[in-house]
Image (cartoon, coloured by chain):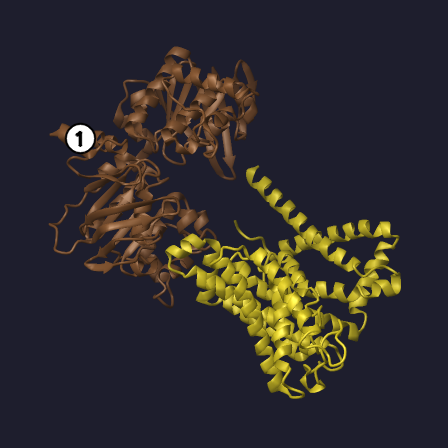
Chain colours: A yellow, B brown
């Protein structure tokens, strides 16, 4: 089976977007909203001004980190649903590492980032160990660990790490300004976050396509039984792939704490883990497509804030549109497979 | 009477069936022979309604139609017995029998089974689970089920794989009876010419998608072989190399060894193999030969006992340690177990020889192209290779210095020419001092290529037979469970 040319793929993606628009119109009509205006507001809300673009990028960074990380376990045919919990755990470790410091600089930030990556990786390792030695499927363990991670955040916020005086959903005591990630000009996105994301994309590309490790991981994913026969150490490799993904998710958590909220919140992960899974599916886990789809999702996310303000609609509509996007991609993919099969059989 | 008229079935550019016309008369036994990939299965699937032909017509029951569906085929009395029985092992005999039949009570079903069994000299306990039956018995049950559904045309796809010689004889007698006394049409799909001679009223020979000839007895073997294989039949098969005199250190020695697999365990076993020896394993499916190989290479556990390899003792059988010590395991199911379907040939080479760095193009040339005649571009994915090329690739991935090869069915799915190449290669390795332990469901193959045969029965070694004593009769009787002491007395 040869892969289609890039042009053909873009064509199919276009078809999927067209289908998604059509479905969106059908969904928005009953709510009484003019469909085209809704979509217009949604996108204008995302790219209408520089500060909005800054917010889009700020949400693009953690989303891309998670989605790129997910490629690694997926290459080994693992569904790391636990990525959401790994983001949270990264945030917890990051906030924990910052607790001793009242103020500081790049050194403290670096320590916190490293702590966050370790936290995410350990949380992922737990799912990996359950999978490899306990034969618990990673989807179940991941989902379970997500709830546990969320529980730990709540306990910390209302327990040991509560703000002096009041414990509330608004999170822990904010960090000192000197511990925030430096911003890119006046935009709300940090250049450190952007740089780390680009670096992650490049590292993952090299790891997957230019190293023996990537080849062996692909082999393990292709056929674990044969990997055993070739002495490729499939168990060790599965654990490593979990940990790499967990580390990137932890990094995303650190960016959320240091660059966006400057504290630990119950909703610190902003569901980026789950969204990243959707991105991965939509990109059929191809690295080249991931950053662009992430950008698209980030625009929808930010733009949806305008829906209640301008249209009097609920902002959850953007979630519906994201879901429709993924669904349309799968419908179009199924159509394409069916056409190909028919062409071959005929 | 069934008439197939100019049946074409094309898959893309591949012509699996290329204009086949054929008349099947009632009361006749046909043998459909041909190499793997000759189009036998496609043709039979067309007849059983599982494949829709690209063009052509089928005349059945006085009606001409362009294709059959499985339901339609069943209504017209066509029944197909597949190579691997399509039954439900966890369910009892009577429930399996009832599948697909009109609604009946359990007592009615048992009566029908009893009646059919009586007519055909079979014996089934209705409440026994199918999993406790042998492959031969399961085939027979499936055959009874097809007859109960009203099949008058029976297609049997390689029915003699995995059954004892005795069971084979019973099956053939039954088929003969069905054809002669009840005017059923029997089509036996096989690649074994001996079976075709024994049973068939006419032999249909297929090659490269076409029906090249229909022969009536008396058969001329030479003519048949040439028609079936074409030029490929002209080739020399190497003799089994002479066994060198036994040295002081055996290649493999097992001392009260136990193996434990996921389903069963076996032991204690004592066994010694010499360098250069080819050892065949015989036995019905699940008699222990699979666990024997998987235990030696370390894929299944060795809870007790000792194993030594070239004089070095191993108390545990760790797969990676044993692999470094020179044991190589080659499973039968190549794409499922041994290769990476979506990786290309060069990537396989990289994975198999991790110590070789840099440009492997030259190494690929010598390893695959020159030694194994693997004519494929290094960018080709393993899943795109033919069965023969997959086996060549697997063999080329075995390092030259491996001392003990463990192979499950080395020629599975290969045509005669490729099978000969594989055997010549394996014998070459044995001549250079490597030992080979293999099993094959084809007993002829086991007997032909072994210095010694280990026969397994009921998850234990039933006997170890020298080449001179390893005849179809003795090995067949051991496979069926006769004790070796009794057999050796009668031969003396």
* Number of residue marks: 1
Q: Residue at x 51, y 62 (%)?
A: A128
Left or right: residue B166 compared with residue B69: left
Q: Is residue B182 above or below residue A18?
A: above
Label 1: which residue? Answer: B486
Residue A227 screen position, x and y as percent: 41, 56
Dividing the image into 4 quarters, which one contains the C terminus of chain B? Answer: top left
Q: Residue at x 88, y 52 (%)?
A: A32
Q: Is residue A265 visible?
A: yes
Q: In the rendered view, would you say B207 is above or below A188?
A: above
Instruction: Determine whether the residue tagged by mark 1 lies in a helix, strand or loop.
Output: helix
Seen at 45% across and 66% down, the residue is A213
* Observer-nearest of B61 and B474: B474
Residue B268 placement (x, y as % from top left): 25, 47
Locate residue A84, reporting x and y percent: 64, 64
- Asked if one can make out residue B67 in the rendered structure from this viewpoint, the answer is no
Residue B349 screen position, x and y as percent? 38, 58
């Amino acid at each position: 089976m040869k892969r289609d040319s890039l042009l053909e793929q873009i064509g199919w993606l276009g078809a999927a977007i067209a289908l998604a628009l059509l479905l969106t119109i059908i969904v928005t009509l009953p709510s009484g909203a003019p469909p085209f205006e809704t979509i217009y507001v949604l996108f204008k809300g995302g790219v209408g001004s520089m500060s909005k673009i800054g917010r889009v990028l700020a949400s693009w960074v953690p989303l891309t980190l998670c989605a790129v990380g997910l490629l690694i376990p997926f290459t080994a045919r693992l569904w790391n649903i636990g990525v959401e919990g790994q983001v949270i755990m990264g945030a917890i470790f990051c906030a924990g590492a910052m607790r001793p410091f009242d103020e500081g600089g790049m050194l403290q930030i670096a320590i916190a980032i490293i702590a966050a990556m370790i936290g995410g990786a350990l949380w992922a390792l737990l799912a990996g160990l359950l999978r490899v030695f306990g034969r618990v499927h990673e989807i179940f363990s991941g989902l379970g660990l997500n709830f546990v991670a969320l529980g730990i955040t709540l306990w910390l916020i209302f327990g040991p790490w509560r703000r002096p005086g009041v414990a509330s959903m608004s999170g822990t005591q904010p960090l000192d300004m000197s511990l925030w990630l430096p911003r890119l000009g006046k935009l709300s996105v940090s250049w450190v976050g952007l740089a780390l994301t680009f670096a992650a994309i490049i590292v993952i590309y090299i790891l997957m396509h230019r190293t023996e490790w990537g080849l062996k991981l692909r082999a393990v994913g292709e056929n674990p039984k044969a990997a055993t026969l070739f002495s490729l150490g499939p168990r060790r490799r599965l654990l490593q792939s979990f940990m790499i993904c967990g580390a990137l998710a932890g990094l995303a958590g650190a960016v959320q704490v240091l660059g966006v909220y400057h504290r630990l919140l119950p909703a610190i992960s902003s569901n980026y883990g789950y969204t990243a899974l959707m991105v991965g599916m939509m990109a059929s886990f191809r690295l080249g497509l991931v950053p662009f789809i992430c950008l698209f999702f980030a625009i929808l996310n930010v733009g949806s804030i305008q829906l209640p303000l301008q249209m009097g609609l609920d902002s959850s509509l953007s979630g519906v549109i994201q879901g429709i996007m993924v669904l349309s991609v799968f419908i179009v993919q199924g159509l394409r497979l069916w056409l190909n099969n028919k062409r071959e059989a005929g | 009477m069934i008439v197939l008229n100019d049946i074409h079935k094309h898959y893309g550019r591949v012509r699996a069936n290329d204009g086949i016309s054929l008349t099947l008369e009632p009361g006749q036994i046909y043998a459909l022979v041909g190499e793997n990939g000759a189009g036998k299965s496609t043709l039979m699937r067309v007849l059983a309604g599982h494949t829709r032909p690209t063009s052509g017509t089928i005349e059945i029951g006085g009606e001409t139609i362009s294709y059959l569906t499985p339901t339609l085929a069943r209504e017209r009395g066509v029944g197909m017995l597949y190579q691997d029985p399509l039954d439900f092992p966890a369910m009892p005999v009577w429930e399996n029998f009832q599948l697909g039949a009109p609604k009946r009570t359990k007592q009615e079903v048992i009566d029908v089974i009893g009646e059919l069994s009586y007519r055909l000299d079979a014996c089934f306990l209705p409440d026994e689970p199918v999993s406790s039956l042998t492959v031969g018995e399961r085939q027979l049950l499936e055959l009874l089920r097809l007859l109960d559904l009203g099949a008058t045309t029976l297609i049997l796809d390689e029915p003699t794989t995995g059954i004892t010689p005795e069971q084979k004889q019973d099956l053939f007698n039954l088929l003969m009876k069905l054809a002669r006394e009840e005017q059923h049409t029997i089509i036996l799909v096989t690649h074994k010419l001996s079976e075709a001679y024994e049973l068939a009223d006419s032999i249909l020979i297929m090659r490269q998608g076409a029906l090249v000839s229909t022969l009536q007895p008396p058969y001329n073997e030479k003519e048949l072989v040439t028609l079936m294989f074409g030029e490929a039949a002209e080739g020399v098969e190497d003799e089994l190399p002479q066994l060198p005199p036994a040295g002081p250190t055996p290649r493999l020695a097992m001392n009260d060894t136990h193996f434990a697999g996921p389903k069963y365990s076996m032991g204690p076993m004592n066994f010694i193999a010499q360098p250069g020896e080819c050892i065949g394993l015989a036995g019905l499916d699940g008699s222990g030969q699979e666990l024997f190989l998987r235990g030696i290479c370390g894929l299944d556990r060795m809870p007790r006992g000792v194993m030594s390899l070239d004089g070095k003792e191993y108390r545990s059988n760790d797969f990676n340690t044993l692999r470094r010590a020179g044991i190589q395991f080659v499973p039968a199911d190549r794409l499922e177990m041994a290769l990476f379907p979506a990786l290309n040939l060069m990537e396989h080479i990289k994975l198999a020889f991790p110590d070789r760095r840099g440009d492997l193009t030259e190494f690929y040339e010598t390893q695959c192209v020159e030694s194994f005649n693997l004519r494929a571009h290094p960018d080709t994915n393993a899943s795109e290779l033919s069965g023969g090329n997959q086996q060549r690739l697997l063999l080329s991935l075995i390092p030259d210095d491996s001392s003990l090869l463990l192979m499950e069915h080395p020629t599975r799915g290969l045509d005669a020419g490729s099978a000969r190449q594989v055997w010549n290669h394996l014998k070459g390795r044995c001549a250079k001092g490597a030992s080979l332990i293999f099993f094959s469901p084809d007993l002829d193959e086991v007997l032909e290529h072994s210095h010694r045969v280990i026969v397994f029965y009921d998850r234990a070694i039933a006997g170890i037979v020298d080449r001179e004593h390893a005849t179809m009769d003795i090995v067949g009787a051991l496979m069926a469970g006769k004790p070796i002491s009794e057999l050796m007395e009668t031969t003396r």
